[in-house]
Image (cartoon, rainbow, N blue to C red):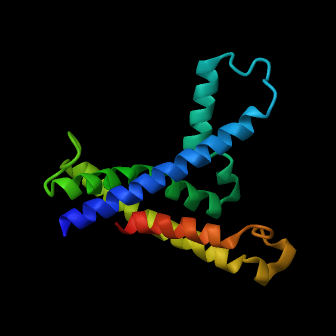
Amino acid sequence: MQVVAIIVCLAVTVVAVALFARAAAEIVGVVRLGQPAVGRTDQPAVRTTTMLAETLGHTRMLQWTLVGAVHWVVFIGFGFLFFTLVTAYGQLFDPEFALPVIGHWVVFEWVTELLAWTMLASITTLFAIRVAGRPSAGGRRTRFFGSTMWQGYFVEAVIAGVGLC
């Protein structure tokens, strides 16, 4: 059974990496279509600090109050719970696998549990907002008008799956 799990996991990983690489190549291709911006690479420390503050602080999303707050929890939780996926991947090959240094640290384990549960509550909230605001219910005035709803549901399901595992 473990061999089957390893084969399935490796096959899914190969497909996922290929899809990721293709999507990254498409994004790079679109970005390269633009003209170079003069001064874009000056002050790298200031630009990096600003980028980190806006990304980790979710400054623009938090303007939407509830949506921004729960989105921030999902963002932080999803990033942090990546380590649980690394652990699960390692345990396919060695059931006793744990991340070096932090793998058995009680604080890390409790923070992981707390983030998983708050992320699940947050993604459930975002799912409910998406269902309530679907275009068939609100027409043009909904924020989801013109979006491909199944993609949003898929992303939310993947995030919920990460939180559950």
Compared to 158, does 89 lie above or below? above
Compared to 120, does 27 lie above or below? above
Quadrant location of the N terminus in the rendered image = bottom left
In screen coordinates, is 72 left or right of 35?
A: left
Image point (63%, 31%), residue name: 50
Q: Splitting the image into 4 quarters, where does residue 151 fall?
A: bottom right
In screen coordinates, is 143 left or right of 24?
A: right
- Picture coordinates of residue 18 (x, y %)? 50, 50
Seen from this angle, which residue lies furthest bottom? Answer: 137
Image point (54%, 53%), residue name: 19
Seen from this angle, which residue lies furthest right? Answer: 140
Q: How many marks?
A: 0
Compared to 121, does 111 lie above or below? above
On the question of residue 77 being in view, the answer is no
On the question of residue 135 being in view, the answer is yes
Q: Nearer the viewer, residue 118 or 78?
A: 78
Q: Splitting the image into 4 quarters, where does residue 125 fall?
A: bottom right
Image point (62%, 19%), residue name: 44
Quadrant location of the C terminus in the rendered image = bottom left
Compared to 158, does 47 lie above or below? above
Image point (58%, 73%), residue name: 127
- Picture coordinates of residue 144 (x, y %)? 75, 69
Q: Nearer the viewer, residue 151 or 47?
A: 151
- Picture coordinates of residue 69 (x, y %)? 58, 58
In screen coordinates, is 123 left or right of 111?
A: right
